[in-house]
Image (cartoon, coloured by chain):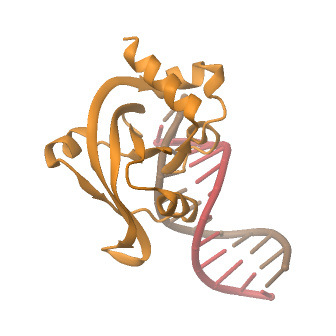
Chain colours: A orange, B red, C brown
Amino acid sequence: MAHWLMKSEPESYSWNDLVRDGGTEWDGVRNNAARLHLRAMRKGDEAFFYHSMSDKAVVGIMRVTREAQADPKDSDWVSVHVEPVRTIAPVTLKQIKAEPTLGKMELIRQSRLSVAPIRDDEWKKILEMADAR
DNA sequence: GCCAACGTTGGC
DNA sequence: GCCAACGTTGGC
């Protein structure tokens, strides 16, 4: 099972919004690299929900509940369906940057990428950081 | 608010 | 096909 990180500005759509909704169509992605990642997602994959801009922290875990299909707003693009799994203690970008083993994360190397893969060891490390609080 | 990084567009 | 100009994202 693969792991991912997906970004959203909390002012636009927050983790709490996702929990409230019980699931959502992750649409609106308009970047080719991100689209490739969306297409590579498989049902059952898990993803971190990252609050960009005002918060800059991983705040929850969600699950891919349906694989990519045409974005309802623009069929040139794709969207997946996701559901919340659980809230985690926030792991901030600052903490991630301070952790040498996380230096290769796409989150850091290419900050503008809104949908990114996460290596197994990175996933595990961030979970450990959340659980340690 | 500023600016770096990245993507896209359009003139040549 | 190259590259300058412009737009957007997102960290600081």
**Residue under the image location 27 percent in, 32 percent down:** A86
**Eyeballing the image, is A18 above or below C12?**
below
**In terms of image quadrants, where is residue A92?**
top left
* Residue A77 image point, x, y percent: 44, 72
Residue A117 in the image, given as x and y percentages of width and height: 55, 46
- In terms of depth relative to the viewer, which is nearer, A132 or B3? A132
In this orientation, does residue A92 appear? Answer: yes
Residue at (40%, 11%) from the top-left corner?
Answer: A132
* Quarter that holds the C terminus of chain A: top left
Residue at (44, 56) in percent of width and height: A42
Q: Nearer the viewer, residue B12 or A113?
A: A113
Q: Is residue A55 above or below residue C6?
A: above
Instruction: Note whether residue A14 is visible.
Output: no
Q: Position of residue A59 (x, y in %)?
A: 34, 31
Coordinates of residue A109 in the picture (x, y in percent): 64, 40
* Camera-side residue of A98 and A46: A46
Q: Left of A126 or right of it: where is B11?
A: right
Rendered residue at 50%/45% (across/down):
A2
Image side of residue A66 versus residue A3, left or right: left
Callout count: 0
Q: Quadrant of residue A71?
A: bottom left
Q: Is residue A23 left or right of residue A91?
A: left
Q: Residue furthest top?
A: A132
